Image (spheres, helix red, strand yellow):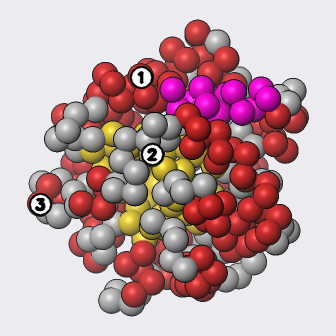
Amino acid sequence: MARYGHGLPQHRGGIFLTDGGMETTLIFHEGLELPYFAAFVLLDSADGRAHLKRYYEAYLRIARQHGLGFVLDSPTWRANPDWAAKLGYDAAALKAVNMRSIRFLEELRGEWGSSAAPCVISGAIGPRGDGYKAGNMDAAEAEAYHSAQIAAFTAAGADMVTAFTLNSINEAVGVVRTAKRQDIPVAISFTVETDGRLVRGESLREAIEAVDDATARACEYFLINCAHPTHFEGALADGEAWVQRIHGVRANASTKSHAELDESETLDSGDPGDLGRRYLSLRRAFPGMRILGGCCGTDHRHVAAVCAACLPSEALTA
């Protein structure tokens, strides 16, 4: 059973951390094989689960050090029917591994969570296709497509679901509608190109307002992930209502474009200190952005740098 219902603690103020770039960390730093960038396959072995536990604990340790809450996103970004079929998972096996991911996070929460620094368990949803290429589903198709994964998270007792690296308004609308129908809180995280726009050219404002209009603002909040702050900071307008709907950032370490990252054979870890300072600038301009983590190329060093930059100045009382 979900612990928080619709009373998510991240709505009550304070900074919440998340993890960083799970797949890039496990592949490039841990030397693991993740076919199709699918981390969920690690849940099927004791050794894989041990790798995942060590990965999450590096971030949970930082949160505990600073007395911060944490959003535990499941390792299921690729655990949808199209990607799972490539890996030999049928519908029953896919449901089982999605549910197992939530139980795995429950064990972590039991070890690391507290009333003062709560851990929120979020079922992570990825795009049906490639997060760097435009999707072609309409909203109704997206609602049907993502329904089974959200149902598995709901049945397993997740507190919420979050769809990451979405570049399609229709897919975002479908995810929100099916989560609303299943009565589980949902967040949407868009990714943008180097010009701060979605891959089809829509602005963040257009995307967020379209999703809110189509779903009666059923989305708990929005995030931005899988882009460097230099790609989207100029697209944000101080004081405009739509920006207040963005509650979190999970940026890339690299300033490279998605196309450049796709072609890279080595990991660009960027500059953790610089990334931390950019998060501080975002926090100062938009204090509602308080769910902080990383995406491709980031690891616990980047999240630690974000804490070092943000916390002494204003984050603990925000």
Taking the view exactly as shown, the residue that stands out farthest to the bottom is: 240
Measured Cα–Cα span from mark 1 to mark 3: 29 Å
The image quarter containing residue 206 is bottom right
The image quarter containing residue 275 is bottom left
Residues in magenta? 92-103
**Is 245 left or right of 92, judged from the image as shown?**
left
Residue type marked 2: Asp
- Label 3: state its secondary structure: helix
Looking at the image, which residue is at 54% across and 80% down?
A: 216
**Is 97 left or right of 154, judged from the image as shown?**
right
The residue singled out by tag 2 in the image is 159
Q: In the rendered structure, which disc, 3 or 2, sits on the residue that comes first in sequence?
A: 2
Q: Is residue 25 above or below residue 313?
A: above
Q: In the rendered structure, which disc, 1 or 3, sits on the residue that comes first in sequence?
A: 1
Q: In the rendered structure, which disc, 1 or 2, sits on the residue that comes first in sequence?
A: 1
- Residue nearest the observer in this picture, 202 or 266: 202
